[in-house]
Amino acid sequence: MEKVIITGADGFVGSYTVQHFLNEGCEVLALDMGDAPRRLKPEGKLSYKKCDVSDIAKMKEIIPAGIYDTFVHFAWAGSSGEARIDHKLQMQNALNTVECMKVAKELGCSRFVCAGSIMEYEVEAAIHSQGSHPGMGYIYGMGKHIAHCMCKAIAANIGIDLLWPMITNAYGVGEYSPRFVNTTLRKIINGEPLQFTAATQNYDFVYVTDVAQAFYKVAKNGKPFCEYMIGSGNAKPLKEFILEMVGSCGPDSKPLFGDVPFTGTNMPLSTFAIDDIKNDCGYEPEVSFGEGTKMTMDWLHTI
Ligand SMILES: NC(=O)c1ccc[n+]([C@@H]2O[C@H](COP(=O)([O-])OP(=O)(O)OC[C@H]3O[C@@H](n4cnc5c(N)ncnc54)[C@H](O)[C@@H]3O)[C@@H](O)[C@H]2O)c1
């Protein structure tokens, strides 16, 4: 793996992943929506192009064929916040993913690596349970799952190796989205009430540099047509993460459990297992939850 295209490259996870590939000596073509990147810093082996991945014709026009060996796809609108329930947007994201994979094949890439989500498992469990009424929050995970299903069949048909790493929950310095760690740390800083569900559901958080390492190792060593869970290797009930985070970052705050109804699906700890990605790809998480939340909190105090 030497020359890599990365979409959504200027996003939170994408930008760390670009840096990891560069550190490993790869040449990276980074694609994102902005005229100029906000997170990515100029570097010799990095080139940046503005590219909306829903404009497939334009993408084919601006990327030369026969140069790149691997295509890593992060571009996805509304992966957090209110837009997660926008079914048209999520369907468009799924369609963009399939079309990007077909472009990757046309450009001569032999591997297509796409950012999946652990929510795909929750979606399956919720949908296949008789009489269930899945919440709207599942729409995003459904989009990911549709993309995954269709990419797998089409990849086999057109002859490109598909790899599907699934992120549990990434967090860290540079995150602005309303995801759990970021939101909770900001509430601690602002002295706002900390209200949660009973938080007995299993969960995992993985520091963003470990996610970037995982994408590099899956792209390089992953077995074709396999999916890989990206986690910390230390999944446990959410309440334990919350107590650890509050204990180290806001010891004066009092978390309230049970105030918010839980409408999700509790996944078994086995869903979060990272044995496959460790054994096949050589992934080893390096940042503990304590270290990661401290770095994130220190950064939040500076912005
Ligand atoms: N952060 C997590 O915990 C997590 C968990 C599971 C899966 N994921 C997936 O990982 C990927 C990256 O997530 P993130 O947290 O960095 O999100 P992010 O929103 O920070 O990054 C997404 C990037 O994609 C770009 N993008 C969106 N639509 C595009 C389009 N049409 N053309 C080109 N670029 C486009 C955005 O500009 C943004 O820079 C997403 O696919 C997301 O669904 C993230």
Image (spheres, helix red, strand yellow):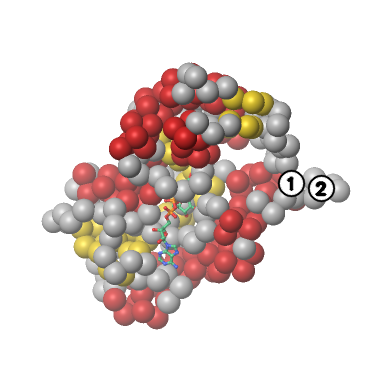
Asked whether disc 1 touches disc 2, contact meaning CB atoms under 8 Å apart, the reply is yes
Residue 259 in the image: state x and y as whole percent.
70, 31
Q: Quadrant of residue 284?
A: top left
Question: Are there few (<14), some (14-19), or many (20+) residues within 10 Å of tag 2?
Answer: few
Q: Is residue 148 visible?
A: no
Q: Is mark 2 within 8 Å of ligand 1?
A: no
The foreground one among 244 and 72 is 244
What residue lies at 55% left-to-right and 26% top-to-bottom? 242
Label at residue 132: 2
Mark 2: secondary structure: loop
Residue 268 in the image: state x and y as whole percent.
66, 31
- Answer with left or right where residue 299 lies relative to residue 93: left
Q: Is residue 189 visible?
A: yes
Label at residue 181: none
Q: CA distance from mark 1 to mark 2?
A: 6 Å
- Answer with left or right where residue 218 lies relative to residue 81: left
Residue 28 in the image: state x and y as whole percent.
25, 57
Question: Are there few (<14), some (14-19), or many (20+) residues within 10 Å of tag 1?
Answer: some
What residue lies at 44% left-to-right and 20% top-to-bottom? 248
Mark 1: secondary structure: helix
- Answer with left or right where residue 246 lies relative to residue 200: left
Residue type highlighted by circle 2: Ser
Rendered view: 7 above or below 126: below
Residue at image mark 1: 126
The foreground one among 54 and 97 is 54
What residue lies at 58% left-to-right and 63% top-to-bottom? 90
Residue type highlighted by circle 1: Ala
Which of the image's four quarters has the C terminus?
top left
